[in-house]
């Protein structure tokens, strides 16, 4: 299926490449060279360079030039790469430099709304689950939480292969919801529950991310999987809203659009698993999970309204 319209981007954004696919046309060489220069200036001179930056670059480049199918796929999934680039670049201007970090306020409000009593003492749900964790739920929560990106990516691959009318809407809605969440990170910087566990209500900025209760998963499997991930976290005070909680809802929504039948149950379980794991792992308060769910609903609603505007046909391939 090729979307046709009066736009110079028509060929570039075609879901299916034409049979006359050519790797190294003049326009392709100019595009690749320009974007490569900009990318490595950004990740090197502006944002500190790390090995994963080159990994992303070579994956995108390879898929763009291998053949028409891989090029179509990488164009469809480009919003995921943009999401990662934008999020990683947020370390340039930490949100705690823009607005005050909310530590005690979120903790007390969450305890007030969702706290549980134990021996006459009210605890946040995070504190209660930390005290009563089990090896089974340590493994289960880790398995759910580690798939917060792989499941959306696998879903993207599925709809690209099976229902190309959904792939662009899904990918760009995913990016749109993230941009909304990033704005809130700067409007309302918030410390995650593990921060209170480690530092109390005292402000400690410019610190590395923390594995939280996911350390139990690492210990049980004998590998520092989550430790390696969270030590590279670009923004420690980005807990409100929980975008981890937004992603599975986006996937669930578009899985329904793709009419996946009984397999929808899998995505419902994925939603519930991620939401529970966010709290169990001590990475998000219940309040932040609800905020993440609300962010997804808001983003999907606004995105659908945006698509109704005629102008969008000249901007996105939908």
Image: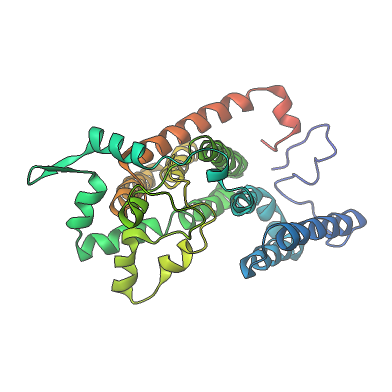
Looking at the rendered image, the quarter that the C terminus falls into is top right
Depth order, front residue of 111/61:
111
**Residue drawn at 30 percent across, 34 percent down:** 109
**Image: 317 above or below 263:** above
Depth order, front residue of 286/300:
286
Q: How many marks?
A: 0
**Image: 103 above or below 227:** above
- Residue placed farthest to the bottom in the image? 222
Q: Whole-percent x and y of residue 117?
A: 13, 42
**Residue drawn at 64 percent across, 53 percent down:** 85
Q: Whole-percent x and y of residue 124?
A: 23, 44
- Residue placed farthest to the front in the image? 202
Q: Is residue 60 left or right of residue 131?
A: right
Depth order, front residue of 236/11:
236
Instruction: Determine which quarter of the picture holds residue 140.
Output: bottom left
Q: Is residue 28 left or right of residue 279?
A: right
The scheme the figure's colours follow is rainbow
- Residue placed farthest to the left in the image? 119
Looking at the rendered image, the quarter that the N terminus falls into is top right
Q: Is residue 22 left or right of residue 303?
A: right
**Residue drawn at 21 percent across, 66 percent down:** 135
Q: Whole-percent x and y of residue 114?
A: 23, 37
Instruction: Determine which quarter of the picture holds residue 103.
Output: top left
Q: Is residue 258 left or right of residue 83?
A: left
Q: Whole-percent x and y of residue 214?
A: 34, 62
- Residue placed farthest to the right in the image? 26
């Amino acid at each position: 299926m090729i979307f046709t319209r009066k736009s110079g981007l028509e060929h570039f954004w075609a879901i299916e490449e034409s049979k006359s696919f050519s790797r190294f046309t003049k326009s392709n060489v100019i595009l690749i060279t320009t974007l490569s220069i900009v990318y490595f200036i950004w990740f090197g001179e502006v944002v500190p360079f790390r090995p994963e930056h080159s990994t992303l670059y070579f994956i995108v480049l390879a898929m763009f030039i291998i053949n028409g199918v891989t090029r179509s796929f990488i164009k469809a999934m480009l919003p995921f790469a943009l999401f990662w680039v934008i999020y990683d670049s947020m370390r340039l201007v930490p949100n705690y430099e823009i607005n005050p970090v909310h530590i005690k306020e979120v903790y007390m409000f969450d305890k007030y709304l969702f706290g549980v009593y134990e021996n006459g003492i009210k605890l946040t749900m995070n504190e209660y689950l930390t005290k009563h964790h089990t090896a089974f739920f340590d493994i289960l929560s880790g398995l759910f939480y580690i798939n917060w990106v792989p499941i959306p990516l696998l879903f993207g691959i599925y709809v690209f292969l099976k229902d190309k009318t959904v792939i662009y809407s899904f990918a760009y809605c995913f990016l749109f919801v993230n941009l909304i969440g990033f704005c809130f990170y700067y409007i309302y910087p918030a410390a995650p529950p593990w921060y209170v566990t480690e530092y109390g209500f005292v402000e400690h900025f410019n610190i590395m991310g923390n594995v939280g209760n996911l350390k139990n998963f690492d210990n049980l499997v004998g590998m520092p999987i989550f430790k390696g991930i969270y030590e590279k976290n670009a923004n420690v005070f980005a807990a409100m809203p929980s975008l981890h909680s937004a992603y599975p809802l986006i996937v669930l929504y578009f899985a329904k659009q793709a009419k996946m039948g009984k397999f929808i149950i899998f995505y419902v379980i994925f939603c519930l698993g991620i939401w529970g794991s966010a709290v169990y792992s001590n990475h998000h308060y219940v309040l932040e999970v609800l905020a993440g769910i609300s962010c997804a609903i808001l983003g999907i609603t606004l995105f659908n309204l945006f698509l109704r505007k005629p102008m969008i046909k000249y901007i996105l391939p939908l």
